[in-house]
Image (cartoon, rainbow, N blue to C red):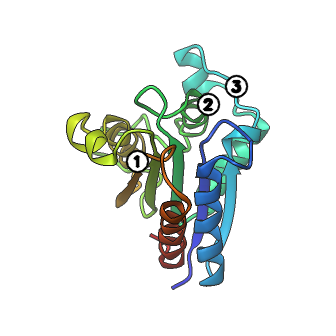
Amino acid sequence: MNQNILIIDGHPDPDPERFCHALANAYAEGASEAGHQVRTVSAAILDIPLLRTAGEFTTGTVSGDMKKVQEDISWADHLLIIYPLWLGTMPALLKALFEQVMRPGFALNLDETLWGEKPLKGKSARIVVTMGMPALVYRWFYGEHSVRNLERNILKFCGISPVRETLIGMVENSNDEKRAGWLMQMSKLGAKAR
C-alpha cells in the first residue's frame, strides 16, 4: 500500500556533500520509485526561531515555515528523521524545529492526561543517525540516549508509533563501498516505507 512519507533532514549544514543529505535522497528515491508520495523538509534552509518561554511554547504563534512543517506532518503516514550526532545528541537546529512544530493543539493535547488521546496517532517513523564513533559503542555504551529521547519523549509522546532506528557509525572513516551500501539500505527502506 502506498504511503505519504515526510523526510525531515535535520543536518544544519546545507552543503550538498553532507552524507545525511545523500541518505535522505536515497530514501526518497527508493520511496518514489515504489510509488509512495514523498515530501522533504530540510532544517538547514528553514527559518526556525528559538522558543525562550513556556508561554511561547503553549500559546505562541507558529511561523510560516513551521506551519508548513506541521501541514507536512499532518499529511504524512510515515516520517523519516535523519541527523548527525553532535555532542551526543541531535543538532540544536533540529531540536528547535521539533520545539516549534510539536506544540499543544497540534502534537500535544494538554487537556488530556499522559495516557489520553495522542494527536499524531497512526503515524510511524524511522530515525537515522550518522556518527563518527562505531554505532555499537553509541548503542551499548552510551545507550543511544539521543534516539531514545526523540523516540520516547517526542514521537511516541505525540502518538507516533512504531518508531524504528538505523545507526550509521564511523562515517568520516568510511570508504565509497561502505557508503554505497548504506545508500542502498536507505533506498530499500524507502521502497518499503519503513
Residue 171 % position (x, y)? 49, 47
Give the residue displayed 52% in from the left and 51% down from the top: 81
Of circles 2 and 3, the one toward us is: 2
Q: What element carries label 1?
A: loop
- For residue 31, say whether it is visible: yes
Alpha carbons under labels 2 and 1: distance apart = 21 Å
The amino acid pointed to by label 3 is Pro
The amino acid pointed to by label 2 is Leu
* Quadrant of image for the C terminus: bottom left
| Nearest to N terminus: mark 2 or mark 3 | 3
Residue 6 lies in what quarter of the image? bottom right
Residue 165 % position (x, y)? 37, 56
The label on residue 36 is none
| Nearest to N terminus: mark 3 or mark 1 | 3
The amino acid pointed to by label 1 is Gly
Which residue, given by chain and number where applicable, does mark 2 sit on? 93
Which residue, given by chain and number where applicable, does mark 1 sit on? 169
